[in-house]
Image (cartoon, grey):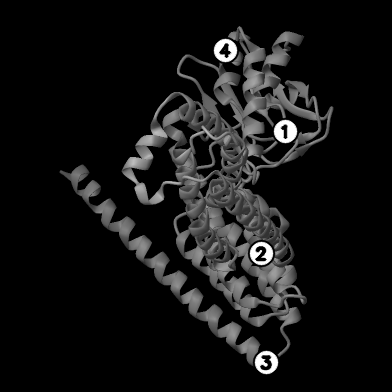
Amino acid sequence: MKYPGIKKLYRILENYGKEAVRSVAFLPVPMIFTAVVFGYIFFWLENNTTISDWTSETFPALAITSQDTARTILGMFIGGLITLTVFTFSQIMILLNQVANSYSPRLLPKLTGDRSLQFVMGLNLATIVLNIAVLLSIRSSDDYKIPNFSILICVFFGIVCLCLFVYFVTAITKRIQVDSIVNATAKEAMDSLELQSALLEQGYAEQGVPENVGEWYVVPSPISGYVGSVDHDTLAKLAQESATRFYIGVSKGQYVPKGLPLMQSEQMLDEDKVEQVLSAVEPIRSQFDDWYLPNLKQLTEIALKALSPGINDPGTALMVIDRQTEILAKLMEVPLYNYYRREEGGEVWFARHSYQEVLQTLMSEMRCYAKLDPLVMRRLFQMLYHLLELAAGGLSYRLFIQGEIAALLRDARRHIRNPHDRKQIVRDIFLHRRSVKHATRLLENKNIFEAEPESAGAAS
């Protein structure tokens, strides 16, 4: 690696870029600068071309002949748009506060990073700046020509801003609804899992960690932070150049204090090589929700908030459990890749969050808050038994899920005291178990039918 500084700079810019796109100022700031540039362009066109004369001839009904009228129109739009922008900002702050209190504060980046919201705010501010620039260009001399072209453009964008305000109110009201938030969060988790499914073609695989990894040399973390995206290709190339192998023992998203082991190398590395390695795996200060686990945690937080006594909205919890079922079912289909190798050589192992760890963490939180609600407990049983049906061909998955079913059943026996609710839960469990047996029987029959042609071919 000849230019480790460039690689490290790229990772820094990548992290800053992830933070920037989640900011509400991501689009407004460049749009304001663009408005300043267009204000200068319009000023040059008005003084060096006959574009305003062409505008007056083409649209005679819109032509303005009085400087006072031009100033009045621009001033009216500036004042109106400033009022509209202040109201919009106030409305955004109120809605964000409502989302943080009702659902989860970790959902705020999803709303502040919404492109439609950023575009509306940016267009309002950019139109105000453009109107001010055109207003300042109007001179009081008698021989000064009215910039009809610039005024017409300003009026057009002002009307567009008024129309977009109606869209903004409708869109932001829809986006803060809990079903929209839950669906968007679940979709992001499913999309990230789809991307992980395609990693096999890029050199990733499932492979056991070397037995002597405990004897490898430790590379400590240079800062306290979270493990984010890792450049496995760069690490594999460095491993090939240094005749070594790497193992990252900290899973993505986990916090690593400064000085504690971040990764291990089979061979000892000099300071230059360590710096190059850290440029590809160095922790970051902030967590990002651009993969499935943070989104799954956010769904859990929404459900727990809905089950809290202050909100008491079990319907939201039931909807979240349905989406969690979808994500956990997809997670069973995604291989847990923990190994990367380049075609030219170089091997990197890395820790992964196991299915058991993800399921156990989710169910521990859900059981703690839902153990007194029979309706939510029934839906949790339904989720686990549905996962058990889907895991009919995977023994390890079945053992994990059966363990969570046993834990949930113990909580139900201890906390659900009403005989009617207990009978309903028992009835549900009986039906679920029958469905699981039926699914297992179908899978066994399918395996038998698939094996028969092979047996016939061997006999012939």
Label 3: how many residues lie within 10 Å, few (<14), some (14-19) or many (20+)?
A: few
Residue nearer the viewer, 35 or 374: 35
Q: Where 256 falls versus 161 (above or below)?
A: above
Q: Of the two numbered discs 4 and 2 on the same chain, state the one appearing first in sequence.
A: 4
Residue nearer the viewer, 211 or 250: 250
Foreground disc of the pair 1, 3? 1
Discs 4, 2 touching: Cβ within 8 Å: no
The CA span between labels 1 and 3 is 52 Å
What residue would you read off at disc 1?
Answer: 284
The image quadrant of residue 254 is top right
What residue would you read off at disc 3?
Answer: 419
Seen in the image, is 200 located left or right of residue 310?
left
Q: Of the two numbered discs 3 and 4 on the same chain, state the one appearing first in sequence.
A: 4
Q: Of the two numbered discs 1 and 3 on the same chain, state the one appearing first in sequence.
A: 1
Q: Quadrant of the C terminus?
A: top left
The CA span between labels 4 and 2 is 45 Å
Label 1: how many residues lie within 10 Å, few (<14), some (14-19) or many (20+)?
A: many
The CA span between labels 1 and 2 is 26 Å
Q: Where 417 falls versus 70 (above or below)?
A: below
Identified by mark 4, the residue type is: Gln
What residue would you read off at disc 2?
Answer: 302
Q: Quadrant of the N terminus?
A: top right
Discs 1, 4 touching: Cβ within 8 Å: no
Q: In the drawing, what numbered circle is on residue 240?
A: 4
State whether residue 363 appears in this view.
Answer: no
